Amino acid sequence: MKVFIKVFFVTLLCFILALGAGLYTYVKFFNPSDIEDYTHTENPSWVVREPDGEEEPSALEKAILSSKRINILLLGLEHSRTDTIMLVSFDRATAKADIISIPRDTFFHREGYDDPGSKKINAIYGVSGAQGVMKAIENIMRIPVHGYATIDYEGVRHVVDVIGGVEVNVPFHMLYEDPYDVPPLIIDIPQGVQILDGNKALQYLRFRHNNDFTVGYSNGDLGRIEAQQKFVKSAIKKAMGFKLPVVAKEIYPFIKTDLSLSDMVLLAGDAINFKSEDLNAQMIPGHATMIDRVSFFVHDPRMVQDLVYELYGVEDESEPVD
């Protein structure tokens, strides 16, 4: 039986939002001659350009143009597929952030990719890379995605240990074995509140159900997403208590992103005021269903529009949504 490796992504959020301030401090005190170069750029990646043409922009387009909100895609990879997809929307004006989870089984059909597995959003990365996934999210949510970041699970293990573990309330005894995984997978985490080190954190994020299916999340992957979001908040709260430049230096080698160092340091002045309680976690609206005998998650365009309008403070225009 295939076990999907749920790659832990919270370090990306910490780095982009909270650790931007730490990186700025690191440069300022250890490389002061570089500070001017790092903090100056004429073209930040999140600048939104005026739309071309004479057509009057919609209320949402106007809100996006005037907003200081930055949308970063976080990807956890399982070989050639994205096993974890989350959009972090950070408002630089208020230093508040929203994490929007996109289930890996979300239906997204691309021309020429008609087999069932290729109609899932997690199949895009293997063909089109992170840029392809970014375009898919822009298509679903109708907002710009300004950059992406990924981390492998060895980086997860390292950073959890660096911050001294993450406290979680394990909802049930997580017990699972897969001798065919490479290396063999053994999950054994007792129920209750505890601090998980790097190894246990990976086990926690990989667990779906026990071997005989009698213990596990009643709603499958959606339950795991809820657990991840709780994990995110706990990890950020823990990371914020550390010396941010030290943590930034430790996790930087494990992160791949198209954001430049200039981009990240430019965020520092806003992100330094970020607090863990200013983080809102939710899942893209929709429902699970079967299509051609394959399990999919289908997003609800109208409810996604409502979510986006709330993010950008747009009043409902009652426009039809495709």
Image (spheres, rainbow, N blue to C red):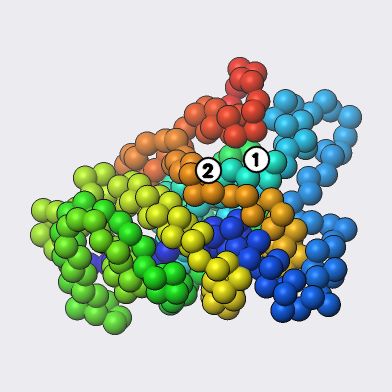
What amino acid is labelled 2 in the image?
Answer: Asp
Confirm whether residue 275 shows in the render. Answer: yes
The residue lying at 27 percent from left, 49 percent from top is 220
The x, y position of residue 294, in whole percent, is 32, 49
The residue lying at 76 percent from left, 78 percent from top is 31
**Among the two numbered marks 2 and 1 on one chain, the one whose residue lies closer to the N terminus:** 1
Marks 2/1: CA–CA distance: 9 Å
What amino acid is labelled 1 in the image?
Answer: Thr
Mark 2 sits on what residue?
Answer: 278
The crowd level at tag 1 (other Cα within 10 Å; few <14, some 14-19, many 20+) is some
Q: Quadrant of residue 148?
A: bottom right
Confirm whether residue 150 shows in the render. Answer: no
Mark 1 sits on what residue?
Answer: 94
- For the residue pair 162 and 10, the one nearer the viewer reads as 162
| Figure quadrant of the N terminus | bottom left
Considering the numbered disc 1 on the image, is that residue within a helix, a strand or a loop?
Answer: loop
- For the residue pair 107 and 138, the one nearer the viewer reads as 138
